[in-house]
Amino acid sequence: MTGRQRLPGQRPLLRTLLVAAGWTVVALGGTFALDPFRNYQLALVAAYLCATAGLTVLVGATGQLSLGHAALMAVGGYGFALTRNALPFDGLPAFVVALLAGALASAVVGLLLGLAAARLSGPYLAGLTLAVVIALPAVASTWSTVLHGDQGVHIAFEGVPDALRRVVALEQWQAMVAVVVTSAVVTGLTVLRGGRFGLRMLAVRDDEVAARLSGIPAGRVKVLAFTASSVAAGVGGAVLCFVAQTVSPGAYTVGFSLLLVVAVVVGGLGSILGAALGSVVIVLLPWLIGRLTANLPADAAQRLDGNLAVLVFGLLLITVMAVAPHGLHGALVARRRRRPSPDVPRPTAEPAPRKVLVPTEEQR
């Protein structure tokens, strides 16, 4: 066999870019057909997808479990907000600079956690990342002069550019920006996972000792993978800050961090499309529950608010793990494989051979 062999799941770079561009155009066109609230939900899905895509690549490709991606989103959001408020200019250039600052801040924190992740694994790494989320409110309160404590940091109002103000509403503009940024993040993660570095991550995940013996620097691979995943989560936090116009520690709790893990598992661990499905679930499911409980009495609705969503997420996780262990995306792939192709002729059953009765000596 000549040429470089491509493993299953890998795509040529040009094909990846074309697919990403196609989905981006479709999503941007879809914003014109959605009302303001649906565009707001689309922007939330895009922001969450950055974090879940980074998390699914980290867990699925390297086997490193992180329970602290909500804190990494908060770092990106704070970096975006503080930089945006400090810039002397407005508009799209200010957004790009603030976005890069948020990504850089999350990369630094992710690098520090990645250095620890190179030495830890399993519950130890999960406990370390979970401790970061737990410590987030204390950090915000300690540096209250900069992070403004529980109130968070509010950014200057980011309106629609003057050239598009008559055509595009605010929610649609935010959704369009979120879609473009998320498309870039997802494309980068796809290229990273489908290249040589992706093969190294899989080798470290499958057998770290064998990977080291074959010359793969397992520690460096873990650090870089954690850093890349942290950057994706930080960009998601920056996009969420851009949409909400504020960032505070109350939005990035332990429950939200665990919800990101649930989204990854429900959608399909290791699959970016599964991460997208999981992001849609964690945005739409609370909204659907709110619609169902809206007609209940005020006291019952208040008791169910928030608690019912957690219960439904738990039941959904148990159901998916029992029915489709590989998540929603894995179930769709398995169903597609079981479906016969229309181009392949179905085998026809051959008639059973006729039995020939040979008379015995007595019958003769």
Image: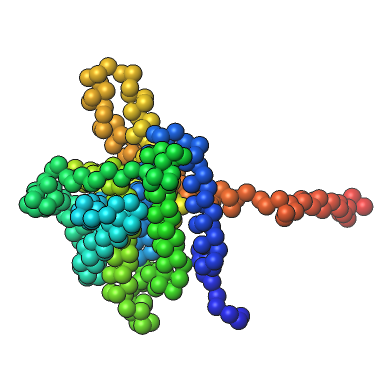
In the foreground, 24 or 256? 24
Could you tell whether 232 is left or right of 332 in the image? left
Q: Residue furthest top?
A: 297
How many dots with numbers?
Answer: 0
Q: Which residue is drawn at 72% across and 55% down?
A: 344
Q: Which of 241 and 56 is in front in this view?
A: 241
Quarter of the picture holding the N terminus: bottom right
Residue drawn at (40%, 49%) of the image: 177
Q: Residue furthest right?
A: 364
**Extreme-front residue of the structure:** 162
- Residue at 71%, 50% in the rendered image: 342
- Residue 218 visible to the viewer: yes
User: Where residue 317 appears, x then y in whole percent?
Assistant: 36, 43
Query: Image quadrant of residue 272?
Result: bottom left
- Residue 36, x across and y down, in percent: 41, 34
Task: Give the quadrant of residue 175.
Answer: top left
Q: Residue at x 35, y 48 (%)?
A: 48
- Residue in front for this viewpoint, 29 or 136: 29
Q: Can residue 56 be seen in this view?
A: no
Q: Is residue 268 left or right of residue 229?
A: right
Q: Tell me how the rendering is colored.
A: rainbow
Q: Position of residue 20 (x, y in %)?
A: 50, 57
